[in-house]
Structures are given as structure tokens and as C-alpha cells.
Amino acid sequence: MGSAGALYPFLTNAPVDVDAVFEQVRHSIETKAHEIRELRVEVHRRDGDNLLRCAEAMAERFARGGRLLAFGNGGSSTDAQEIASQFLHPDAGGTALPALGLTSDIAVVTALCNDVGFDVIFARQLGAFGGPNDIAVGISTSGNSANLLAGFEEAKSRGMLTVGIAGYEGGKMSESDSIDHLFVVPSPSVHRIQEAQTTLYHALWELTQSALSRDRDGAAPQGTPASMRE
């Protein structure tokens, strides 16, 4: 097994200290849980007010008949699809809102990649589908994806509300003038970034639902969303 034996001790025939392995696993789980809990607290400290402002702006667009268009690459593309699904098919008690994941139609994505270029796959779709009442939500771990930056520029030129979710220090997304609301998860770990980003966009959904409900019922504004509470 070589070095793999250290990573997967149960696959070897050599004697294994089971208690030691379980202790390592327990310690690893506790450390990661602590890291993501602290990171969520930091994101809320840095961006709690911006989350509220963004949710209010999103609720206003939805109230005017707007749609949410979400996009990202790789693992972030699945997050984008989850964002769209969360708004379109909410939990019990939530209001279904029109949303579309721009990576869901593989025929469109591959046609644009093959015929035009990878950097335009989101800009072309936002140009075709987006309007001044709509919302563009782009998610990236690095914040440096060229096709996201092009997508935000196209969305902004069409009067869309633009929302960016990035990691590390925000990358080139933090330098863009085309993003109205930018949320950065400050961590060097891809895993912790993606976990906190998931919490962040679920909180954004919850706050948007709350803003829409308040507009309908006259309820008091919601503070910290349940998804970001300890």
C-alpha cells in the first residue's frame, strides 16, 4: 500500500491501532467543525449588514417580476444550481420565486464553448435572458474566473442587480465595478470557503423571503438569519 496505507489504514493487513485512528478522526472532525463555525461568525460580522441590504434589493426585484440567474464553474456551478433550486423550490412555507441556473442546460454551455469560447458562456446567456428587473448571482472560490467577470459586466450593462460570492480575499471580483453586492469568505481552505458560501446563500434566500413576507404582511425586519445562528 505504501504511503496510501497511512491514509487508509483499514485497507492494509498490518496491525492497526483502531482507537488511535478513531481519535485522529474525532480530532479532525472537531477541528473542522470549529473552523467552519468561526468562519461563519466572521462572515456574519463582516457582511451581516450587506446581507440585509442585498436581500432587500433582491426582494424588490422579485416584487417587480424579476428572476434570479445563477452561475459558476466546477463545484461552484453545482452551488449555482442549488441557489436556483432553493429559490424556485423553497422549503415548506417559503414562496417559490423564478430562478435559473445557467449551467443547467449543457447543450447551451457546450455550444457556446465550442462555437465562441469558454469566457462568454455566462455573458451570452445573461445577455439573452437578463433584463433590468432581474438578479445575477455569480459564485466562485477564487474570485478570478474570467467568465464570471464577463458575466457581471454584461449583467450590469443591462441594469440587473449583481451579487457576487467569492473566497480567499475576493480575487478580481473584489476589483470589479460591475458587482453591486460582494460577499467574500476569508479563508485559505477551499473546503471551508465552499461550506461557508453555502451557508451564506441560504441566509440570503432566508432574508429575501423575510423581506418579501414583511412587504406583504407588514412584519418587523428579521435580524440574523437562522442559517447563520449558532
Image (cartoon, rainbow, N blue to C red):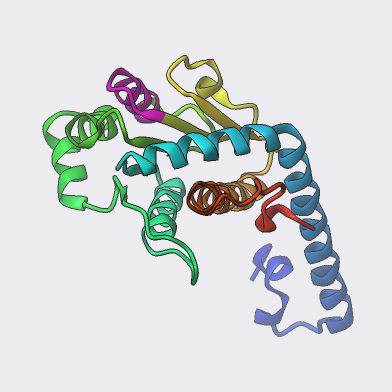
Where residue 140 sits: x, y (%)?
49, 37
Of 65 and 74, nearer the camera is: 65
Q: Which residue is drawn at 78% across and 53% down?
A: 37
Quadrant, the C terminus: bottom right
* Residue at image location 32% in from the left, 22% down from the top: 159
Is 199 rendered above or below residue 146?
Answer: below
Is 82 left, or right, of 156 in this rendering? right
Range covered by the magenta-colored residues: 147-161
Q: Position of residue 225 (x, y in %)?
A: 67, 52
Which residue is drawn at the image coordinates 48% and 51% (left, top)? 216
- Asked which quadrant contains residue 81, the reply is bottom left
Quadrant of residue 186 in the image? top right
Q: Does the magenta stretch include residue 158?
A: yes
Magenta segment: does it hold 222? no
State left or right for residue 64 relative to residue 206: left
**Residue sitting at 39 percent across and 24 percent down?**
149
